Amino acid sequence: MMYFPSHLSIAGVVMLATLQGVAAAPTAGLISLDVQQMGNRTMGFIGCSMAENVAQGYVAVGGQRMWGPYGTNGMVVQSWTDFNSTSWQLFDEQVVSYGKPTAVWVQLCIYAQNGVTYEEAKTLIANARQHAAPGATIYITGQPAYEAGRSCLRAGANGPELTERIAKQAAADTTQNVTYPGEFKLLKAEVLDDGCHANSAGQESLGQQALAFWG
Ligand SMILES: *[C@@H]1O[C@H](CO)[C@@H](O)[C@H](O)[C@H]1NC(C)=O
Ligand SMILES: *[C@@H]1O[C@H](CO)[C@@H](O)[C@H](O)[C@H]1NC(C)=O
Ligand SMILES: *[C@@H]1O[C@H](CO)[C@@H](O)[C@H](O)[C@H]1NC(C)=O
């Protein structure tokens, strides 16, 4: 019976099987390199394209703890309230590669029409716990904030502020045991024409902010 560490990727398993069929010698070195790289990213995240913007920048500035972007475009709060949603299935695909995360960042990202309630935020936190390793640290934030007079209208005129308020409410609620690391910020020159998303300078800035928040 062979033992595979939980963080060994499917790719690693396939590679091991393939190499064993060919030659024994190079296997150990290749596999341990693969495991090291995969074992590195022990922090997962949920959120929409705005979370991807953070993850893109985080990888670009050399962040090692959190996962890279994994295609969460459009995945607002209601995409994550169902424990078995396609969004959570996508999350679980990352878990196959990286292992169960020991920390998860919950980004509250919204569309104006549905917004977010505190009950929904609590459901996301509970779901994150269930999909993570036991005792995992849960971070919660809102969407990034913009300079005065600017907002992400897709999220509603006061949408980013609403997500921020609910994130802080969760962190202040001792029953939730979650950490609010601070507010992500985007300057005017760091935002695309849609008023929401980060350009490459904005992504880099968000990546640096994430590094400061959780390493
Ligand atoms: C992650 O891996 C890189 C190189 O693969 C290494 O430089 C870095 O120290 C590792 N980080 C951790 C936290 O293990
Ligand atoms: C999720 O799906 C699994 C299997 O597909 C099922 O066993 C489980 O009851 C579902 N959970 C919820 C909360 O729907
Ligand atoms: C609260 O979360 C921390 C991780 O951040 C964990 O170590 C601890 O066990 C949790 N406490 C409770 C009471 O669940």
Image: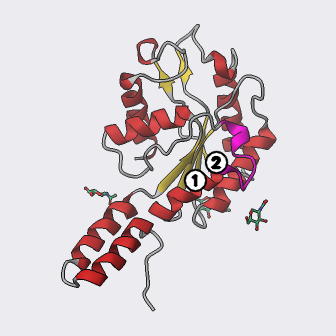
Per the rendered image, the range of residues in magenta is: 76-87
The residue indicated by pointer 1 is 91
Q: Is residue 42 above or below residue 105?
A: below
Near mark 2 (Cα within 10 A), the count class, few <14, some 14-19 or many ≥20, is: many
Furthest toward the bottom, the residue is 1
The residue indicated by pointer 2 is 87
Q: Are marks 2 and 1 in contact (CB under 8 Å)?
A: yes
Q: Does dot 2 land on a helix, a strand or a loop? A: helix
> Callout 2, which amino acid?
Ser
Q: Quadrant of residue 59?
A: top left
Residue 146, percent across and down?
A: 54, 17
Furthest toward the top, the residue is 149
Asked if residue 73 lies left or right of residue 26, the reply is right
Q: Where the N terminus falls, by quadrant?
A: bottom left
Residue displayed at 47% across by 21% down: 186
Near mark 1 (Cα within 10 A), the count class, few <14, some 14-19 or many ≥20, is: some
Asked if residue 110 lies left or right of residue 188, the reply is right
Residue 178, percent across and down?
A: 63, 49
Q: Quadrant of ligand 3?
A: bottom right
Q: Is residue 9 visible?
A: no
Residue 166, percent across and down?
A: 71, 34
Judging depth in this view, the residue of 134 and 80 nearest the camera is 80
Residue displayed at 57% across by 11% down: 150
Furthest toward the left, the residue is 25
Residue displayed at 75% across by 53% down: 175
> Callout 1, which amino acid?
Phe
Q: Which mark is residue 10?
A: none
